Image (cartoon, rainbow, N blue to C red):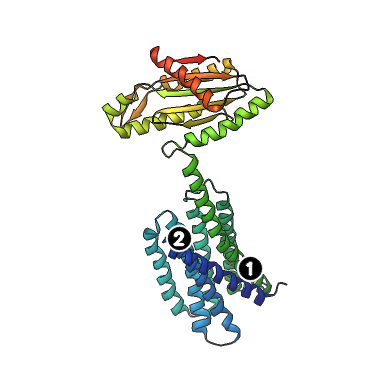
Amino acid sequence: MVHLPTIITVSILLNVLIGGFLLSLYILRQQSSYLYWGSSCLIFVVAQITASLRIFIDFPLLTHYLADLFIIAAPLAAILGVHAYNNTDKATLSYCIGVLITSVFVLIPLYNIQINQIFTTFIIACCFSYAAYALRKLQLNRIKHALLLQVCFVLHAILMFLQFVLLMLNSLSWLAIDISQILAVILISHIIITTCTAMIWPLLMFLESEQALTDLANLDPLTGLLNRRAFLNISAKHLEQANNHKKELCALMIDIDYFKKVNDEFGHDAGDEAIKWVANKIQSQLREQDIVARIGGEEFAILLPCTSKENGRTLSERVRLAINSEQFIYQQQAISLSISIGIINHTLGSRNINDLLAQADKGLYKAKNNGRNQVVVMAF
């Protein structure tokens, strides 16, 4: 059996360090999620200390009543930390305060250690169930560690509901076994999972911040496509691979026809929505290995690795038709859009990516001069 005092001591030290670290981050960045999560860690420390005092003193008001309130307050603060990330903590704050105040008044008249434990366990189980649900609402789809945090919340909820059932059955004398050992295992698991959860949250926030910085550097904020810088870097690597392995590839330059007219007639908001609509249409026609970017106002670039001239032209026509065959709807107004495409096929090993795009851009220029809404294939 794991030594419980050792587990509690290690948990207290880790939570103090994590809580202090998160509060220092709040002071530096003024992000409420760090304040709530750091507070959750420190509240859990106080809960462990007050509950542990049962061994040394007989003072139920502190060691049971206040300890139970602190145990309930810790996951409530964690819930506020989750909501603070999406700036919805103010709407949730009143509900969390309501749960805590209700607990304050419910636990006093009961003042029965066994019944209080049942009530506290049930509230904690509900809190962690809700925390797992609330975490799904965060915009953290890029960070897989969010799933690990959600698993911790779910495991926590399951353990607490199991403890609640055991305590209920035991209070009704429906169990013929001694559940003290089972409750000890649940307690140790509760402490370990809580500490792990406290460690995952700052890691999650750090990874999310790093991903946000990476996206800011590499992605176009309007469409979510690669920006020009990232496209050139990635395409240069593909071109080098094509040269080394004597593979074909195609580069496309795309421009939305008469885009200024859309802005003039319908406004710049309509223009932004049109750009996003065209970007989605382009992406829907590309293969997994193809690379697409927005490199200018209404201009896009595409690299088609391992693609012959014929296949590149076929795919280009498919992209053009996908946009021209369907109308873009903005505020219940149908707007007809089309694109012009210049395409170049690369089979030699002497050109860099800028040369390739310059040739494709010449094809785009010809497509526009020839009447727009068409594909022009250039040759080296």
Q: Which of the two discs, 1 and 2, labels the residue nearer the N terminus?
A: 2
The percent position of residue 2, horizontal first and vertical second, equals: 71, 72
The label number, if any, that marks residue 168 in the structure image? none
Q: Is residue 172 left or right of residue 138?
A: right
Q: Are marks 1 and 2 in contact (CB under 8 Å)?
A: no
**Residue at the image point whose x is 52% and y is 48% from the top:** 211
Q: Which residue is mark 2?
A: 33
Q: Report x, y in % for residue 366.
A: 43, 14
Q: Residue at x 57, y 31 (%)?
A: 236
Element under disc 1: helix
Mark carried by residue 186? 1
Percent coordinates x, y for residue 42 in the rendering: 51, 71
Which corner quadrant of the image does residue 290 belong to? Answer: top right
Q: Secondary structure at mark 2?
A: helix
The residue type indicated by label 1 comes to Ile
Q: Quadrant of the N terminus?
A: bottom right
Q: Let me know if residue 318 appears in the view.
A: no
Which of the 4 image quadrants contains residue 330?
A: top left
**Residue shown at the point (69%, 75%) measured from the top left:** 3
Question: Which residue is situated farthest in the right direction here?
Answer: 1
Looking at this view, is 35 or 68 the one in front?
35
Q: Horizontal and vertical percent for residue 162? A: 60, 64
How many residues crowd mark 1 within 10 Å: few (<14), some (14–19), many (20+)?
some
Vertical relation: 25 (above or below) 212 = below
